[in-house]
Image (cartoon, grey):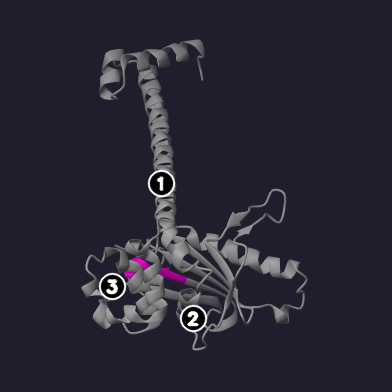
Amino acid sequence: MFIPIVSDYGFKATFGNEANTLFLRKALQALIKSAVPIKEVRFDKNAFEALTVDGRSGIFDLACTDERGNHFIVEMQLAHSPYFLQRIKFYALHKLNTLVERGQFDYSNLPSIYCIAFLEKNILSTKQYHTIANLRDEFGRQIDSQMTFIIVEMTKFDKEAADVQTDLEKLIYTMKTLHKVTETTKYPLFWDEEWLKKAIEELDTRRMTPEERFQFARITAINAEAVYAEKRKIKEARQEENLLVKTEIVKKLLERGKLSLEEIAEDNEVSLEFVTAIQGQMKANPGV
């Protein structure tokens, strides 16, 4: 009945909903553990250009600024990404450089930057699902809070609806379970809270207009094609790697000269033509 929040369409319809930012504002407040409500947010350009000719450009899933000038970068990563920390550091530092480039050379006036990442696969060795990191000394004491990294590892969150209490827990529970609901009678009570209720309505396939259904189908098809293309690249790369390995093995066996061409082909699960072709190359280019 419901589109996953963690999908491209779901993320844009909830976190990226420019017409109604209540869900985004409440989510950000919960994620940074602030007691002060965020009253408004302005969506920023989420693509950025390289600072140098040979530098890297990129794109955030979402970038916004609140009424106090705090900057937020939000990323969703579903695939395994062991070097994701380096990626979000790159994003956050690029944002910092952009603020300085705009002429704010009085470092005391630099606004706070929050770089938030939702991960489906774990990358940290800690047990908690929600990690807040700042610059600290060797004793663990915070020495700077201008730049904050927030990592949410969703697989580590295992609370049942009855145990959920905080807005952060409500957010992560909803992100993990909404798309699995098959009966509306199983709604947890906190899904009636306005910020979650509005977001859930955006993901309810039964309420979608024909145009919204078309857009959802279009995005789903594009993503499916992208996944297929990526899997094909991986498969081709593995096949090429396997081919190179077998080529080297066949070369060594031919150099030793203890097995027949047929035996080499059979033992390495390659065709006789493959072995004879390598043999021909070796004779044409001895020593290579």
Magenta span has 153? Answer: yes
Q: Which amino acid, mark 3?
A: Asp
The secondary element bearing badge 3 is classed as loop
Name the foreground residue: 44 vs 213: 213
Tell us which disc is closer to us: 3 or 1.
Answer: 1
Where does label 2 land, which residue?
Answer: 29
Image: magenta residue range: 151-156
Task: Report the quarter where the N terminus lies.
Answer: bottom left
What residue is drawn where x is 42% and y is 70%? 152
Q: Position of residue 224 (x, y in %)?
A: 39, 46
Gap in Å between the C-alphas at discs 2 and 3? 22 Å
Gap in Å between the C-alphas at discs 3 and 1? 31 Å
Where does label 1 land, which residue?
Answer: 221
Mark 2 crowdedness (10 Å alpha carbons): few <14, some 14-19, many ≥20:
some
Tell us which disc is closer to us: 2 or 3.
Answer: 2
Position of residue 229 relative to residue 28, above or below, is above
Q: Is residue 161 visible?
A: yes
Where does label 3 land, which residue?
Answer: 158
Side of 96 relative to 170 (left or right):
right
Q: Position of residue 56 (x, y in %)?
A: 63, 52
Q: Which amino acid, mark 1?
A: Ala
Position of residue 22 relative to residue 240, above or below, is below
The secondary element bearing badge 1 is classed as helix
